[in-house]
Amino acid sequence: MPGTQGPLNAFLDLRQMPVEDAELGPLAGLRLAVKDIYDVAGYRTGCGNPQKYEEAHAASRTAQAVQAILDAGARFVGKTQTDELAFSLFGQNAHFPYPVNPAAPDRVTGGSSSGSAAAVAGGLANIATGSD
């Protein structure tokens, strides 16, 4: 299972591979962070669970919702951490250093989309996927 990278512990430390996106479109120039419950072609999806990650194969296709954002011109910048199996209200996964809330470092980022929230709030991405 990968660790996290960056000062906010928002992104999973994965080998970066090119992900196709449109050069033009309403989201052109925006950086997209993708929660690690959504497939991105070439990447494994672990859902915050080390066993699931180790058993996963790299996705052959990008999730339809994520692909629509890429087709609108956003550029993929990385997969973000999530609570294990996206199951918590606190945004803390025992397998990773907790994401940092850049607006209030002494408070949790909240929810299973904590890595995505930290990435956007900290200016590491313009937009990110999450779930509820």
Image: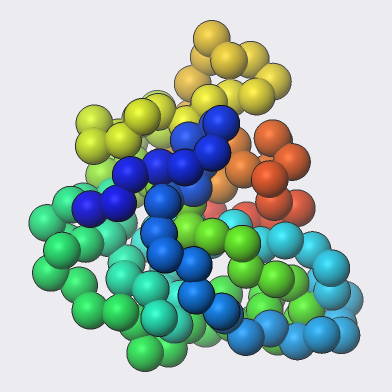
Front position in the image: 61 or 11: 11
Whole-percent x, y for residue 47 in the image: 30, 56
Q: Residue at x 84, y 68 (%)?
A: 29
Horizontal arrangement in the rendering, residue 129 relative to residue 123 (left or right): left
Q: Residue at x 31, y 71 (%)?
A: 44
Front position in the image: 76 or 107: 76
Indicate whether 81 appears above or below 29.
above
Whole-percent x, y for residue 14 in the image: 40, 59
Indicate whether 113 appears above or below 26.
above
Q: Residue at x 40, y 28 (%)?
A: 98
The structure's colour scheme is rainbow
Q: Residue at x 23, y 79 (%)?
A: 57
Horizontal arrangement in the rendering, residue 44 relative to residue 112 (left or right): left
Q: Can residue 131 be spotted in the picture? A: no
Q: Residue furthest top?
A: 106
Whole-percent x, y for residue 41 in the image: 44, 82
Q: Can residue 92 be spotted in the picture? A: yes
Indicate whether 16 appears above or below 108.
below
Whole-percent x, y for residue 99 in the image: 47, 31
